[in-house]
């Protein structure tokens, strides 16, 4: 009788373990489906100043983060923890949005990938103190103490990991995510679909920050104005290059060089370590530009 009871108990325990394993697998699949169906661009905090999409982190790391002048330019915009995330990411896309309050990183990540980010990046970079854990409105946040009294915060929800030094931005994004009030500004949505998502990275930015204009003699001044532009970043023959298009301007071809010089000068002012030369040409009522800089 005792042997029989023991067999029943063992069978019951095995059934429970198997059931829990199946339920865990089903939940994992559901989270994967939810993550796969979520567009990172829908999560972007309102009114970004610029967007950076790193489509191929390993290529981007070799292309940019190993070259002193390029590293300096990106390090001036991205906090070190995000540069480390790019280096350690071997799968998936990273999206960064830039705001007056700070930079936000968005990554599609399952539980295994989140744990890998914590172990390889966060625990190494913020090794002195254990993170502060806080749950608010059903979202579990982790805050890591950094220098100058700052805290790096992050959370994982619905198969998406979000991190930023701005608690305000984190909470605004999580509220939109939980409330399913997700949307993409039409102009940004159009541009990101026109970008080459196979390029190592894409940048979307407001054109007025470049103050790009041409004012030829006896012709009205041409200026891009208040709209967004997109550029693809890639390597070509040992040079760092970007490619994109500008609003069409009905100008004589001779003035395109003036436009290219202006664009080179603006970027040189923003990032002195990158001396990029541009070529601009007109085709099918569009202005296309290609800019390259030697390493």
Image (spheres, helix red, strand yellow):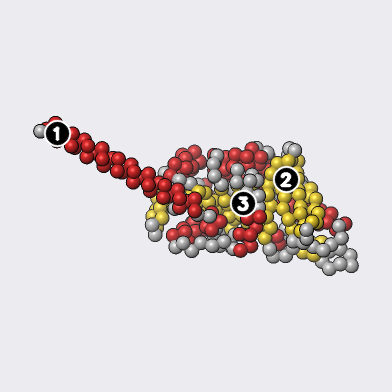
Residue 277 position within the rendered picture, expressed as x and y whole percent measured from the top left:
79, 48
Do we see residue 278 in this rendering?
Answer: yes
Rounded to the nearest angstrom, the CA distance separating label 1 from label 2 is 74 Å
- Above or below, 146 against 220 in this view is above
Which is more toward the observer, 286 or 151?
A: 286
Q: Look at mark 1 in the image and give the residue it sits on.
A: 4
Using a 10 Å C-alpha cutoff, classify the residue at mark 3 as few (fewer than 14 neighbours), some (14 to 19) or many (20 or more): some
Q: Contact, CB < 8 Å: mark 1 with mark 3?
A: no
Mark nearer the viewer, 1 or 2? 1
Work out whether mark 1 precedes mark 3 in sequence or the reverse, and give the earlier one.
1
- Above or below, 49 against 275 in this view is below
Left or right: residue 36 compared with residue 293: left
Mark 2 residue element: strand
Q: Residue furthest top?
A: 3
Q: Look at mark 3 in the image and give the residue it sits on.
A: 52
| Residue 47, quarter of the rendered image | bottom right
Q: Quadrant of the N terminus?
A: top left
């Amino acid at each position: 009788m005792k042997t029989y009871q023991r067999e029943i108990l063992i069978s019951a325990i095995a059934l429970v373990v198997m059931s829990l394993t199946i339920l865990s697998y089903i939940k994992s699949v559901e989270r994967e489906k939810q993550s796969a169906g979520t567009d990172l661009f829908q999560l972007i905090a309102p009114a970004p100043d610029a967007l950076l999409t790193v489509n191929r982190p390993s290529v981007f790391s070799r292309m940019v983060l190993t070259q002193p002048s390029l590293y300096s330019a990106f390090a001036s915009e991205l906090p070190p923890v995000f540069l480390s995330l790019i280096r350690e990411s071997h799968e998936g896309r990273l999206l960064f949005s830039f705001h007056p309050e700070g930079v936000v990183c968005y990554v599609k990540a399952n539980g295994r990938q989140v744990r890998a980010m914590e172990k390889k990046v966060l625990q190494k970079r913020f090794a002195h103190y254990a993170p502060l854990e806080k749950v608010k409105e059903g979202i579990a946040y982790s805050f890591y103490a950094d220098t100058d009294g700052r805290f790096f915060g992050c959370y994982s929800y619905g198969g998406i990991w979000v991190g930023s030094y701005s608690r305000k931005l984190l909470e605004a994004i999580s509220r939109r995510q939980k409330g399913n009030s997700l949307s993409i500004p039409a102009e940004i949505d159009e541009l990101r679909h026109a970008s080459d998502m196979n390029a190592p990275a894409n940048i979307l930015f407001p054109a007025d920050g470049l103050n790009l204009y041409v004012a030829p003699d006896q012709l009205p001044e041409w200026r891009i104005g208040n709209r967004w532009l997109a550029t693809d970043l890639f390597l070509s023959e040992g040079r760092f290059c970007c490619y994109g298009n500008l609003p069409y301007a009905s100008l004589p071809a001779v003035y395109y060089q003036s436009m290219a010089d202006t664009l080179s000068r603006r970027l040189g002012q923003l990032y002195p370590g990158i001396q990029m030369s541009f070529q601009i040409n007109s085709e099918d009522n569009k202005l296309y530009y290609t800019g390259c800089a030697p390493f």
